[in-house]
Image (tube, grey):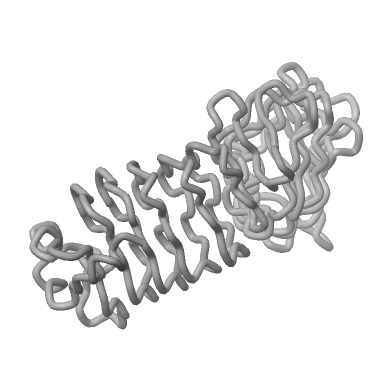
Amino acid sequence: MAEYEIKDGVAIIPEGTTEIKQSAFHGCKELTTIVIPASVIKLGDVHFCFKGCTNLTKIVVAEGNPKYDSRGDCNAIIETESNELVAGCGTTVIPDSVTSIRFWAFRDCELLEKIAIPASVKKLSRDCFTGCPNLKSITVAEGNEVYDSRNNCNAIIRTEDNVLIVGGTETVIPDSVTEIGPFAFDHRAGIKKIVIPDSVTKIGDLAFNECSGLTDIVIPASVTTLGDGAFSGCANLKTASVLGPVKALTETFSSCKALNTITFGAGIKKIERAFPYDSGTLYDAKEDYYLKTINVPAKKANYYKSRLPEQLHSIIVELPAEKAKK
């Protein structure tokens, strides 16, 4: 429940208010417009102030506010002194004077479909666009010295080390990308398919968390590091292939209850609570889980039996040698 009155979608914050506290508008789906008075000089953790305000489309900071502004009718809150964008919404246009974007600045912006990163931005939080299920168009302005969106890929790539740090529902991962960063595609429910190129060697924690539109994924043999929960919560994921000598699978496919078939390559060293069928808190035989087959390379059944709980041994299938190589 909002701390302030909301009338016809507009938050009524009295002039003279100096602080908007954490969670002041938490979960207010009816909120569409907010005007920050000139008297407000302190915002609680902004990512909690507006968390769950999925229909917020207009943000205005009153003229004369000494701490914050919404320059150029950008529909965002910007910290004036630092030029950091601290909170955005579904219609934000980032001004070309902004130099950084705070963590969770666009959290739960379900109406956000496109974003353009100006050349002035030098620092992006890794999870500033988490919870944006419909974000599809992502561009970085020419001349940005830190980030790029090469080949019209609809993603933000850190130029120096070729790490993809933010992706969208229509991202095409360039074959120059070497790593998919943590939270890069977090909660992108609109993704139907993604191709991970052979240039990628690492996928970060929760990189594809809650991508409920995904139905299959192939993790190529080039990937040797998979972060915790990399594909957790992909509720409609039916088939998955992990083809490389990944060091560890830890909660990789947890809560993927539709997972039917998984294919392993040779040499996965450790499997720990990788999917909802392992022993422990994530496994419940009474649940309606669908895992039917675990494919492994020829002569590798015993290798994987030593790494998987006993209740899964009966569904391990050795592939013929020629198929295992694919």
In the image, 228: left or right of 86?
Answer: left
In the image, 51: left or right of 15?
Answer: left
* Spot occupied by residue 138 in the image (x, y as percentages of width and height): 72, 45
In the image, 246: left or right of 30?
Answer: left
Q: Is residue 121 above or below residue 304?
A: above
In the image, 125: left or right of 273?
Answer: right
Which one is nearer the viewer's eye here, 200 or 39? Answer: 200
Q: Residue at x 74, y 25 (%)?
A: 144
How many numbered discs? 0
Q: Is residue 24 visible?
A: no
* Spot occupied by residue 2 in the image (x, y as percentages of width and height): 65, 54
* Spot occupied by residue 101 in the image (x, y as percentages of width and height): 66, 31
On the rendered image, what quadrant is the C terminus found in? Answer: bottom left
Q: Is residue 81 above or below residue 170?
A: above
Where residue 149 sits, quadrant-wise, is top right
Q: Residue at x 71, y 31 (%)?
A: 85
Which one is nearer the viewer's eye here, 291 or 79? Answer: 291
